[in-house]
Image (cartoon, grey):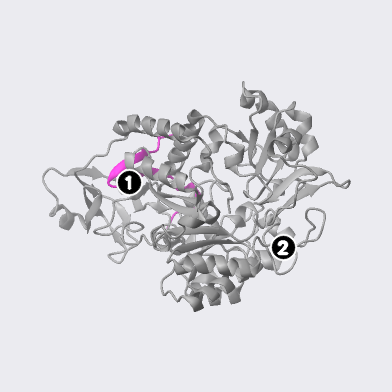
Amino acid sequence: MWQAKLLVKSTRWQWVVLLALALLTVSLLGRGRGESVIVNAQLLTLGNAAETATTMLIRDQTIVAIGDEESVLDQASSAARIVDMQGRTIIPGFVDAHSHFPVSGLSAVSVNIAPPPDGPGVSKAAVLAALQDAIPEQVGSADSAFVLGFNYDNTVFSDADHPTRDELDAIGNGHPIYLWHNSGHLGVANSAALEKLGVNENSPAVLGGQRGVDVDGRLNGLLLEKAAPSLTRLLKELSWQDQWRIVSEARDEYLAAGVTTVQNGYASELMRQFLNGLHTLGVLPQRVNTWIAHDKLDPAKRTQYPANTTVKIIVDGSPQGLTAYLSSPYRVPAFGKRNAGFPLYHQAQLNALILQYHQLGYQLALHGNGDAAIEQIITALGHAQAQAPRTDARHILVHAQLVRPDQLARMSAVGLSPSFFSAHTFYWGDWHRRTLGEQRAAGLSPAMSAVENGLRFSLHADSPVTPMDLLFVMWASTTRMTRSGVVLGEVERLDRLTALRAVTIDAAWQAFQESSVGSLEEGKLADFVVLSENPITAVDIRQVKVEETWIGGQRRYKRDRE
């Protein structure tokens, strides 16, 4: 969902400085080898071996034995380090099926205007007050730099109205201000920001985007979809020190959440190289998956990537932003009119685009929220499969929030599996009941229907749209409770084991990584998380804490005792 064209428009020397700083950090993080035996644990393997075990032998970065204590210790050397887990639960490391690492680290350099419980933005007035208080610190000596308000959500405001250009002008003292909506699909600019972006009433229309206007036809500052600026554009003047703060903040946030494989779901080639370089150096201990944004690929180079490359294509917008493409309209007017959202491609365009990548053997990650957009995707993939059949393409329907039952039944035939954004039921479930109606809202993220259709799927947080907390994602998918306490579509609630698999081994399968991560089995990498409770049996999953995160047999995070 997050459309950010992330972070980097910096000169290459800035990235050289960052990598040099990374080298200085490697020795602090350690890249140790050796042999360790994890004992006295409740290991949930999620693999083909025994469902639970008590002991695990790790040599270098790999699990070489798992089972009962006696049989595993027999295979350990006398030099093995014994680690007593004191009966705590261990699960495979969480595999981030879709987010935008390291965008969540922007919290370190922007103004937090998210709604509670993540920020102060409970109302438009609260958002404006937070911005006004932060402007002097944010601007500093760079009078022309954007003041970025990060992750506002108008759906929690009593009137659901977006802030306006004029309201931002009133507090901005001439500084460019841009508010980034937490859907990532829209935002609001003040007059100075519009001028800096080169946007005015005479600017040509943008295919796949819209600009909001007031009753007099004057721009009101609201910029939607492809009319909204990318983060690359907004942050091009960001210092390398701030970029380092962003990466460090996100790294530590994901480690504390037990995420051992991170993902950037809309990456440029430069960002892919940068994140892989940080991982190679050991500064970023997590394993890294990147989806290359198709509009960042040089058309002349599209055939030069490995066949296992994943390419991201955004087909529509977001339901909370009322831009997801639906087959029937939203129940409330948006942007001054009754609407059903809009597609970002005509069907013929999408057919040609998908066929090109499908024929190259690439995996496609296709952002589709509304049922009309999803129909476009299924149609285009059907066309591609007819031209170039592939038996294990594992193309991904990203978000799949309003996928219909008849569409779920047709997904396997075109090689498509969903990755559900199940936390939507909590964060925007009440909003969807209002904007979609009870029946359509109850069918949001229909994960149990996917099970019944024999589809293997993942769950994701889409951070920074929602916080990186996959235990919370599990809770949301198994309770489907909204902010107000309403259960939204009870029949679509998952059992906990299925939800846990969807953020570990099934997420790894979707990324073609099931042979190396996602479960605790012999021969796999020793990526695992130590929890305060068993998430399958805990009274409330939200109370389960990540106590330790291990990657490649090395502990990379330990929670401070409260």
The residue tagged 1 is 551
Give the Cα separation between the discs numbered 1 and 2: 42 Å
Q: Residue furthest front?
A: 300
**Looking at the picture, which amino acid does disc 2 mark?**
Leu
**Looking at the picture, which amino acid does disc 1 mark?**
Ile
Q: Name the spot of residue 82 as percent of width and height, x first.
A: 20, 44
Q: Residue furthest left?
A: 78
Pick the residue in front: 64 or 55: 64
Say if the magenta span includes residue 554: yes
Highlighted range, magenta: 537-562
Say if the magenta span includes residue 262: no
Q: Residue at position x 73%, y 40% from top?
A: 123
Q: Secondary structure at mark 2?
A: helix
Q: Residue at position x 37%, y 51% from top?
A: 93
379 sits to left or right of 517: right
Pick the residue in front: 159 or 244: 244
504 sits to left or right of 45: right
Camera sees residue 187: yes
- Quadrant position of the N terminus in the picture: bottom right
Pick the residue in front: 173 or 43: 173
